[in-house]
Image: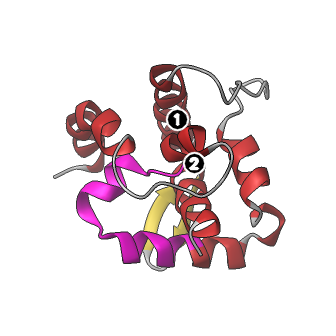
Amino acid sequence: MQRRKFIQVSAVGTTVIALTGISCKNQHSAFYNILDKPGQLSSICDLNTIREIGMAYRLQTPSESGADKLADLLSADSVGKTISSSSDDFIIQNLINQKIKQDFKAGNTVIVKGWVLTVTEARQCALLYAINQ
């Protein structure tokens, strides 16, 4: 299946996937529960693989290794304005989906452990690893 079609097909399930899974131990747990769920990747990878990708991305990009830094980067819109952690889940998920699409269009991708991912997806994996290590 082509990656573009895969993203379109799995976009519907992203919200459901994003709202399930491991709960984080941070004071912003509901906010992080959306940010740290790479929806499309979760459809084809198990949790351990996603964690390994997250760990590898943090090693590749040490300036983005902290959970708060990753959350700030993930929750910033296209002009750099950060949305509130109290924002509606739907708004947060839409922002993440838009960022992934924009990354693909701009060619803003990275290779991590053999996976070609958008920077947003890699950051989501890194956040998941950071808050659950």
Return the residue at label 2.
Answer: 120
Tag 1: amino acid:
Ile
Mark 2: few/some/many CA within 10 Å (<14, 14-19, 20+) = many
Side (left or right) of 84 relative to 55: right
Query: Which element type, helix, strand or loop, lies under badge 1?
Result: helix
Does 107 lie within the magenta span?
no
| Image quarter of residue 31 | top right
**Residue 112 placement (x, y as % from top left):** 53, 73
Which of these two is toward me, 75 or 60?
Answer: 75
Query: For the point 49% across and 41% down, which residue is it?
Result: 34
Mark 1: few/some/many CA within 10 Å (<14, 14-19, 20+) = many
**Residue 114 placement (x, y as % from top left):** 44, 78
Q: Is residue 55 above or below residue 90?
A: below
Tag 2: amino acid:
Thr
Q: CA distance from mark 2 to mark 1?
A: 7 Å
**In the current view of this chain or complex, which residue is farthest to the right?**
63
The magenta stretch spans which residues? Answer: 36-54
Does 42 lie within the magenta span?
yes
| Image quarter of residue 131 | bottom right
**Residue 85 placement (x, y as % from top left):** 67, 30
**Residue 17 placement (x, y as % from top left):** 31, 44
On residue 96, the disc is 1
Labels 2 and 1 touching (C-beta < 8 A): yes
Side (left or right) of 73 relative to 97: right
Label whose residue precedes the other's in the sequence (2 or 1): 1
Side (left or right) of 14 relative to 58: left
Query: For the point 38% across and 42% down, which residue is it?
Result: 18
